[in-house]
Image: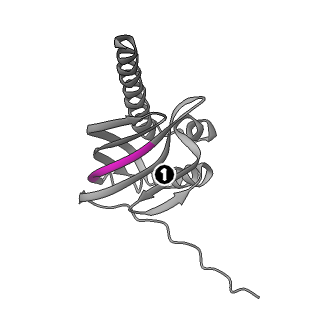
């Protein structure tokens, strides 16, 4: 019985370390700026959902396009997550933490936009390892100049 308890504890610690590493690599990847299909597969499930202050998406392809477009608004960024609470339940897990994001606008002004909030992430164990299946960011405060979001093109009326 003692061996089973040790194995469960070791599995939990290993899962927590793997999840912590995935989340850190994800935030670092935002600052590195390479958003392609390999990036999306490395971090997200096929049916991932994401809710951000600038919109919600469903599916890995939609998330990839949303992140690619959003990050193009900035020349440089630094993303940090602190006080992460990781809870593992078999092949599912949650991570809750505080996120601080510093952005240098891509408009040539050099202006900073800083946002802080709480992030909540759900993960699932896949054959490739842990992947993000859902995430939401609730911004609590901002400072500086927000980026100018591109406007949607005018739609032609249906015939």
Q: Residues within 10 Å of mark 1 (few under 14, many from 20)?
A: few
| Above or below: residue 13 compared with residue 135 | above
| Above or below: residue 44 compared with residue 13 | below
Q: Is residue 120 magenta?
A: yes
Q: Residue at x 34, y 37 (%)?
A: 87
Q: Residue at x 40, y 16 (%)?
A: 4
Q: Quadrant of the N terminus?
A: top left
Image coords of residue 78 (percent x, y): 33, 40
- For the residue pair 15 and 33, the one nearer the viewer reads as 15
Image coords of residue 138 (percent x, y): 32, 57
Residues rendered magenta in the picture: 114-122
- In the picture, measured across the screen, residue 45 lies left or right of residue 81, that is right
Image coords of residue 103 (percent x, y): 33, 49
- For the residue pair 124 and 102, the one nearer the viewer reads as 124
Q: Residue at x 49, y 34 (%)?
A: 91
Image coords of residue 125 (percent x, y): 52, 34
Q: Is residue 126 magenta?
A: no
Secondary structure found at label 1: loop
Residue 108 appears in which quarter of the rendering?
Answer: bottom left
| View extreme (front): residue | 1
Residue 58 appears in which quarter of the rendering?
Answer: bottom right
Instruction: Identify the residue under disc 1.
Output: 72
């Amino acid at each position: 019985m003692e061996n089973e308890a040790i194995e469960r504890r070791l599995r939990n610690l290993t899962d927590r370390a793997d999840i912590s590493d995935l989340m850190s690599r994800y935030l670092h990847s935002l600052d590195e700026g390479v958003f392609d299909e390999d990036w999306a597969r490395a971090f997200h499930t096929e049916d991932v959902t994401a809710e951000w202050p600038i919109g919600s998406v469903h599916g890995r392809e939609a998330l990839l396009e949303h992140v690619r477009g959003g990050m193009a608004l900035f020349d440089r960024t630094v993303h940090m997550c602190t006080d992460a609470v990781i809870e593992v339940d078999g092949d599912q897990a949650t991570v809750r933490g505080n996120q601080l994001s510093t952005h240098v606008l891509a408009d040539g002004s050099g202006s900073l936009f800083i946002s802080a909030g709480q992030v909540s992430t759900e993960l699932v164990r896949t054959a490739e390892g842990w992947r993000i299946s859902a995430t939401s960011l609730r911004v609590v405060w901002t400072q500086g100049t927000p980026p100018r979001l591109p406007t949607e093109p005018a739609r032609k009326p249906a015939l």
